[in-house]
């Protein structure tokens, strides 16, 4: 018992250090490249991460974080906010390398992020990083299905808003105001998406139990989301959303395959891979692997998908691999021309 506690404490610290270090590195790179706008986006994303976590823990009471993290605000570890910023930023860098139209990139960003959560969350809750209100043997290995949907809407809403703001004139006051409130706008998109998802999932149960829903309640019983019938419909809706997300991403990559930039961002790849590797190692260090071998298989399978979507454009002949090196102006100019052609063809 003492050994497990000691190992767990070290994993808490290691996770926080990974989040803080990764955040510092991506900030440093954008400062090094004198890209102030990107620095502000990363900071905005970290603020968004803290807002959504604080809001969700206080509004839903469906989960809570361990108090063993070093730095927390309103019972939410600061490392979690930084992790959101790092994951979303690196996902956006990945879709940028594919050079598909900007309106399609948020969907790929959401896919990149949610497959990470598929591997990460079941391990994290068994390490005690955070705790959900359902048993460990329900839904996605103890993770509510709405959390997976939430990951899709979190990344989709923030990425879309930020990419849209990039198309505006940042010198205008309206553009600056939209950027300042972008974390709140993104959180609104998340709440809207989860509300629609929950309504659709609960609707069949509500029809079968219409008498229960005749009286309006300002404080609805959220435990209904874990009714067996509702859980089935949550899974069905989640599968539909996930399949359509995969379908859209696959279509985008196939449709614009001739426009891959063949630039490999080693930093974003390494950071996202680091999260996979950390939780995979934690499976064995904590002894979870011997108790649930299925999580080992799950982690390896999803990691292979992660490798595929990162390496696909560069398997044949990568022309540029970089970490802190600026991309030459000629390459950037070529990509801008290609993107204009793509956007015009879409219109």
Image (spheres, helix red, strand yellow):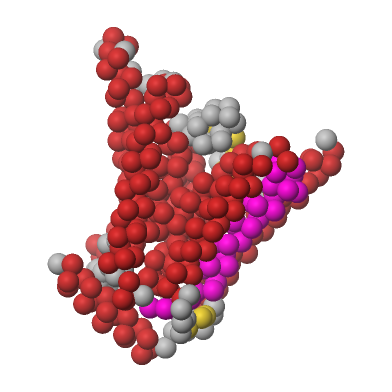
Q: Is residue 321 left or right of residue 186?
A: right
In percent of width and height, residue 141 lies at 56, 36
Query: In the picture shown, does residue 309 fall above or below 262?
Result: above
**Viewer-proximal residue, 29 or 213?**
213
Residue at the (49%, 58%) spot, across then down: 305
Q: Is residue 288 magenta?
A: yes
Q: From the image, which quarter does the C terminus lie in?
A: bottom left
* Residue name at image x 52 percent, y 68 percent: 268
Which residue ends up furthest to the right in the rendered image?
2
Which image quadrant for residue 103? Answer: bottom left
Task: Give x and y (percent) for residue 160.
Answer: 32, 58
Residue occupying image coordinates x 39% and y 66%: 95
The residue positioned 45% from the left and 69% from the top of the image is: 312
Q: Quadrant of the N terminus?
A: top right
Q: Is residue 152 above or below residue 228?
A: below
Residue 23 lies, in percent from the top left, at 56, 63
* Residue 203 sits inside the magenta stretch: no
Count the labels in the image: 0
Q: Is residue 227 visible?
A: yes
Question: Farthest top residue?
Answer: 211
Question: Is residue 216 visible to us here?
Answer: no
What residue range appears in magenta? 261-289
> Given the current orientation, which residue lies at the most extreme front position?
316
Question: Is residue 187 depicted above or below 107 in this figure?
Answer: above
**Prevailing secondary structure class for the magenta stretch in the rendered image:** helix
Q: Camera-side residue: 158 or 330?
A: 330
Give percent across and percent down for residue 168.
Answer: 25, 68
Viewer-side residue, 79 vs 107: 107
């Amino acid at each position: 018992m003492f050994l497990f506690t000691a190992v767990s404490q070290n994993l808490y610290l290691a996770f926080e250090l990974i989040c803080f270090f990764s955040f510092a590195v991506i900030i440093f790179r954008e400062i090094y490249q004198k890209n102030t706008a990107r620095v502000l986006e990363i900071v905005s994303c970290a603020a968004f991460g803290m807002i959504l976590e604080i809001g969700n823990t206080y509004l839903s009471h469906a989960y809570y974080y361990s108090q063993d993290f070093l730095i927390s605000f309103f019972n939410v570890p600061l490392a979690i906010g930084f992790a959101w910023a790092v994951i979303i930023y690196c996902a956006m860098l990945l879709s940028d390398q594919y050079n598909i139209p900007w309106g399609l990139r948020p969907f790929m960003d959401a896919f990149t992020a949610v497959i990470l959560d598929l591997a990460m969350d079941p391990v994290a809750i068994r390490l005690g990083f955070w705790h959900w209100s359902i048993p460990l043997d329900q839904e996605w290995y103890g993770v509510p299905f709405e959390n997976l949907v939430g990951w899709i809407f979190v990344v989709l809403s923030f990425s879309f808003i930020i990419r849209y703001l990039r198309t505006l004139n940042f010198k205008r006051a309206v553009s600056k105001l939209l950027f300042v409130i972008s974390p709140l706008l993104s959180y609104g998109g998340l709440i809207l998406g989860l509300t629609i998802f929950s309504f659709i999932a609960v609707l069949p149960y509500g029809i079968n139990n219409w008498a229960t829903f005749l009286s309006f309640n300002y404080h609805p019983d959220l435990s209904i989301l874990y009714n067996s019938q509702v859980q089935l419909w949550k899974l069905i809706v989640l599968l539909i959303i996930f399949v359509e997300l995969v379908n859209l991403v696959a279509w985008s990559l196939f449709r614009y395959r001739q426009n891959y930039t063949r630039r490999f961002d080693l930093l974003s790849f390494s950071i996202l891979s680091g999260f996979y590797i950390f939780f995979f190692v934690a499976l064995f260090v904590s002894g979870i692997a011997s108790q649930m071998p299925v999580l080992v298989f799950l982690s390896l399978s999803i990691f292979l998908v992660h490798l595929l979507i990162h390496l696909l454009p560069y398997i044949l002949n990568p022309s540029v691999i970089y970490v802190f090196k600026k991309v030459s102006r000629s390459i950037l100019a070529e990509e801008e021309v290609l993107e204009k052609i793509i956007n015009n063809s879409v219109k």
